[in-house]
């Protein structure tokens, strides 16, 4: 992971829909509750997050002034070249780069994939993930 793959954001500024890094994984923020500082305490942010790869959910309690990392996600379109038993071979529509990625959950992306289909691909933290089948 390089510093250009993410940017810092204060926990108190998180909003629903933001993406954050936690324990080396990328999560989407599903809920945010902020509490005010008490007489001797600090403001806290209770953040409900969901892993974008596995779907696991967590609840984080963070000091409002702490900084968390937000990944930079590049969104591209790719064409399916081949569906292998354990991976899918794709070609980027802009750079024509050919690469392989893991097989996604077909229910989440909108149906099974076959050669010639176009898909939306998210590239972040050195990973590529198919997010949606284009109609």
Image (cartoon, rainbow, N blue to C red):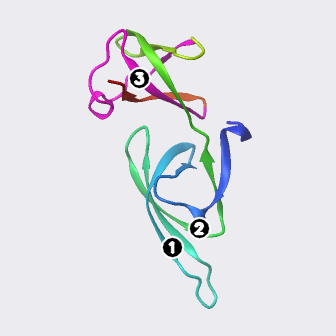
Q: Quadrant of residue 67?
A: bottom right
SS at badge 2: helix
Residue under pointer 2: 12
In space, the residues marked 2 and 3 are separated at their CA atoms by 35 Å
User: Which label number is shown at residue 34?
Assistant: 1
| Crowding at mark 2 (Cα within 10 Å: few <14, some 14-19, many 20+) | many
Magenta highlight on residue 124:
yes
Residue 34: image location, x then y, percent:
51, 73
At 72% from the left and 38% from the top, the residue drawn is: 4
Residue visible at 53% across and 16% down in the picture:
92
Q: Earlier in the sequence, mark 3 or mark 1?
A: 1
Q: In which image quadrant can residue 88 be found?
A: top left
Q: Residue at x 36, y 15 (%)?
A: 117
In what element is the residue under mark 3?
A: strand
| Left or right: where 34 falls relative to 41 | left
Residue at the (52%, 52%) spot, across then down: 18
Q: Look at the numbered discs 3 and 1 and tell me whether their residues touch, using CB distance below 8 Å.
A: no
Q: Check the image and report above or below for 75 versus 8.
A: above
Position in image of residue 83 (x %, y %): 36, 11
* Range of magenta residues: 97-125
* Above or below for 9 versus 123: below
Name the one closer to the observer, 79 or 54: 79
Q: Is residue 130 above or below residue 4?
A: above
Q: CA distance from mark 3 to mark 1?
A: 37 Å
Pick the front one: 112 or 77: 77
- Reading the image, the residue beneath label 3 is 119
Q: Is residue 107 left or right of residue 80?
A: left
Residue nearest the observer in this picture, 123 or 85: 123
Q: Earlier along the polypeptide chain: callout 2 or callout 3?
A: 2
> Circle 1 sits in a helix, a strand or a loop, which is it?
strand
- Asked if the residue at tag 2 contacts the one at tag 1, i.e. Cβ–Cβ closer than 8 Å, the answer is yes
Nearer mark to the viewer, of 3 and 1 = 3
């Amino acid at each position: 992971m390089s510093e250009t793959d993410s940017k810092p954001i204060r926990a108190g500024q998180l909003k629903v829909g933001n993406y954050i890094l936690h324990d080396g994984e990328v999560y989407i923020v599903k809920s945010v509750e902020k509490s005010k500082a008490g007489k001797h305490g600090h403001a806290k942010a209770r953040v409900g997050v969901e892993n974008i790869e596995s779907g696991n959910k967590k609840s984080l309690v963070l000091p409002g002034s702490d900084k968390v990392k937000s990944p930079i996600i590049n969104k591209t379109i790719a064409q399916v070249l081949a569906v292998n038993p354990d991976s899918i071979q794709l070609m980027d529509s802009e750079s024509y780069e050919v690469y392989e990625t893991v097989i996604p959950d077909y229910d989440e992306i909108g149906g099974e994939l076959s050669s010639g289909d176009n898909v939306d691909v998210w590239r972040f933290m050195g990973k590529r993930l198919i997010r949606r089948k284009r109609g």
